[in-house]
Image (spheres, coloured by chain):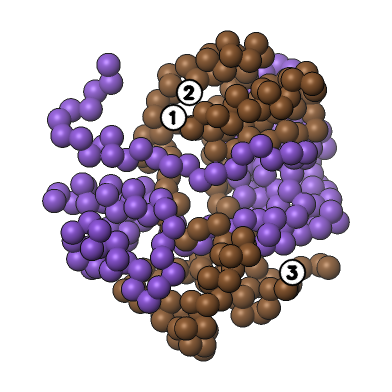
Amino acid sequence: MTDDRLLFKVADLLQGDLAVTPRPFAALAEQLGCSEDDVLKAIMDMQSKGIMRRFGAVLRHQQAGYTCNAMAAWQCPPGKENEVGEIMASYPQVSHCYQRQVPEDFPYQLFTMIHARSEAELQQVLKSMAAATDINDYALLRSVKEYKKVSMRYQLEERLRPGPKEEV
Amino acid sequence: MKQLDNHDRILLDYLQNHFPIKAAPFLDLAEQLGITEAEVISRVQALKQRGVIRRIGAVLDARALGYHSTLCACRAEPEQLDRVAAAVSALPGVTHNYQRDHDYNLWFTVTAPTAEAVDELLQELRQETGVAMVAMPAVSIYKIDARFEMSVKDDR
């Protein structure tokens, strides 16, 4: 098995849920027909290549006590996006921070997902972000109803097919 | 529901930030925390059962894998919202789908192998629901890090 084939096979299995047993990676190795060391090495390889952002526990933030969550979208003066984006990204309560292409009827380019443990903490973070960036015009979009929230399941087998993978 | 104790909180921080890539990861964590491997395993199982831990595994980088992911939104009539939301959620590439308190009242993410595939999915959704779908693709990414500090004392 080539290195890349093994990487994608390991990545494919690790999109699932690791067994909580004394030797969880040995079980995966057996499934893949490689050694436990191969699996551990593949994980470290993928982390250094940037394919895997991290390996570990993914929490449900509500159950973890982060009950006040909101998306805030900020109206950023043109040309200031990078400066403001970096400031907003530095808040530990901000999990995602993006500049986005937006339609005319939604003139808020900088998106932040904020997770707080109380309404007071959420308000305090918003106030602090506004003061630190000198932006007071923002849309606060609270979630009213969660229709769907799942982890992405990438179709990595596509990458394991032999031959060129040009798209038709 | 039982409150998380200090051991749970410290364990959750380790599991998110320093999961040992080692043959016996729970034994390694046990040694760092000064508890037994059996206790680590039973605490992790309990945290999964209570729904605090969604899963333990790889967080892959969509872009590094060549995938395209876009935030999208639409304005649905209130009485149509559940129907439109159901059509959106039915797509396998949709991972997040929320009603939000704004004129744009439905927000969702679409992930697909190419940018064209994302556009096609939005076109199909428009035809199926009769509602215009707006894509707001990322221009710059400043942060993606959905980890939650658990052992830092909160304000309550």
Report the mark closest to the observer, 3 or 1.
3
Is B27 left or right of B149, judged from the image as shown? left
- Mark 1 chain: B
Marks 1 and 2, Cα distance to the nearest angstrom? 6 Å
Looking at the image, tell me whether mark 3 or mark 1 is earlier in sequence order: 3
Is B110 drawn above or below residue B26 in the view shown? Answer: above
Name which residue lies at 82% across and 37% down.
Answer: A136
Contact (CB < 8 A) between labels 1 and 2?
yes
Q: Amino acid at mark 3?
A: Met
The residue singled out by tag 2 in the image is: B118
Callout 3 crowding tier (Cα within 10 Å): few <14, some 14–19, many ≥20 = few
Amino acid type indicated by mark 1: Ala
Q: CA distance from mark 3 to mark 1?
A: 39 Å
Q: Position of residue B139 (x, y in %)?
A: 54, 30
Label 2, secondary structure: give it. Answer: helix
Q: Do pointers 1 and 2 mark residues of a single chain?
A: yes
Residue A106 drawn at (x, y percent)? 73, 22
First reached walking from the N terminus: tag 1 or tag 2: 1
Q: State whether discs 3 and 1 lie on one chain.
A: yes
Cα distance, mark 3 to mark 2?
A: 41 Å
Disc on res. B1: 3
Q: Amino acid at mark 2?
A: Val
Chain given the colour brown: B
Q: Is residue A97 above or below residue B47?
A: above
